[in-house]
Image: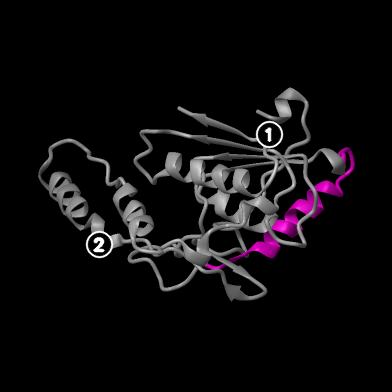
């Protein structure tokens, strides 16, 4: 879509590709930064006008990478269904005791995903699929697991991403009825932190 409107566009792969991790577990933020620098160096790209678009869990990787002191300057950031914290790694089965992101080879602090909050939903889904005569989706509404993680006392702590260090306008887009995770609340928290730390007159929040 971006290319169709005349922009030079690329997709940065960080998982589920040959040679990359199969799940969102311990992704190095350095890999995100290396991809941004490689894109900015391409012929036809103006390195002073690079923007970044990320969605869902990918927003954690982008925001954490751009919050580092070694991040390149960019023109703007768009985060769709974002998070303001780093979360526990995701994998097939129970969440592993690891962060979704690393820096300098070490896990970034993370908020735990309360997977036990999904047990009832998992059982109901499995029963419905077993006894239904029609195909039934196995998709889960993960909101309870993420919301419970955030509501725990001092859950965020050091896991909060220092987004105030990003020297570029941020557009956060989120849905009030998001059933996957509390993206609207996290989008507000993200922009509130930036507002408390400096001039964010060009930031925008779009709630759907």
Q: Residue sitting at 70 percent across and 64 percent down?
A: 30
Q: CA distance from mark 1 to mark 2?
A: 40 Å
Q: Disc 1 vs disc 2: which is toward the camera?
A: 1
Which label's residue is closer to the chain start, 1 or 2?
Answer: 2
Using the rendered view, name the quadrant where residue 68 is placed: bottom right
Of the pair 163 and 200, the residue shown nearer to us: 200
Q: Is residue 94 above or below residue 177?
A: below
Kindly identify which residue carries mark 1.
201
111 left or right of 79 in image: left
Of the pair 177 and 130, the residue shown nearer to us: 177
Q: Is residue 13 visible?
A: no
Chain part drawn in magenta: 26-46
Q: Secondary structure at mark 1?
A: loop
Q: Residue sitting at 68 percent across and 56 percent down?
A: 67
Q: Are marks 1 and 2 in contact (CB under 8 Å)?
A: no
Of the pair 48 and 44, the residue shown nearer to us: 48
Q: Position of residue 83 (x, y in %)?
A: 50, 49
Q: Is residue 65 above or below residue 204?
A: below
The 10 Å Cα crowd at callout 1, few under 14, some 14 to 19, many 20 or more, is few
Residue 39 painted magenta? yes
Kindly identify which residue carries mark 2.
116
Q: Position of residue 206 (x, y in %)?
A: 53, 29
């Amino acid at each position: 879509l971006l290319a169709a409107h005349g922009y030079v566009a690329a997709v940065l792969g960080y998982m589920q590709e040959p040679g990359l991790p199969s799940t969102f577990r311990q992704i190095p933020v350095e890999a995100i930064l290396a991809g941004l620098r490689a894109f900015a160096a391409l012929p036809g790209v103006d390195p002073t006008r690079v923007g970044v678009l990320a969605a869902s869990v990918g927003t954690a990787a982008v925001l954490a990478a751009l919050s580092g002191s070694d991040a390149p300057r960019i023109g703007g950031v768009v985060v769709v269904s974002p998070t303001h914290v780093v979360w526990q790694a995701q994998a097939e089965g129970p969440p592993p005791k690891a962060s979704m992101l690393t820096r300098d080879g070490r896990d970034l602090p993370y908020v735990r995903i309360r997977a036990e909050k999904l047990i009832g939903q998992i059982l109901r889904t499995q029963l419905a699929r077993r006894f239904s005569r029609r195909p039934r989706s196995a998709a889960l509404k993960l909101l309870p697991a993420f919301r419970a993680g955030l509501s725990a006392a001092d859950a965020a702590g050091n896991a909060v991403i220092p987004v105030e260090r990003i020297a570029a306008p941020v557009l956060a887009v989120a849905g009030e009825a998001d059933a996957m995770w509390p993206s609207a609340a996290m989008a507000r928290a993200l922009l509130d932190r930036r507002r408390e730390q400096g001039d964010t007159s060009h930031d925008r929040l779009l709630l759907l």
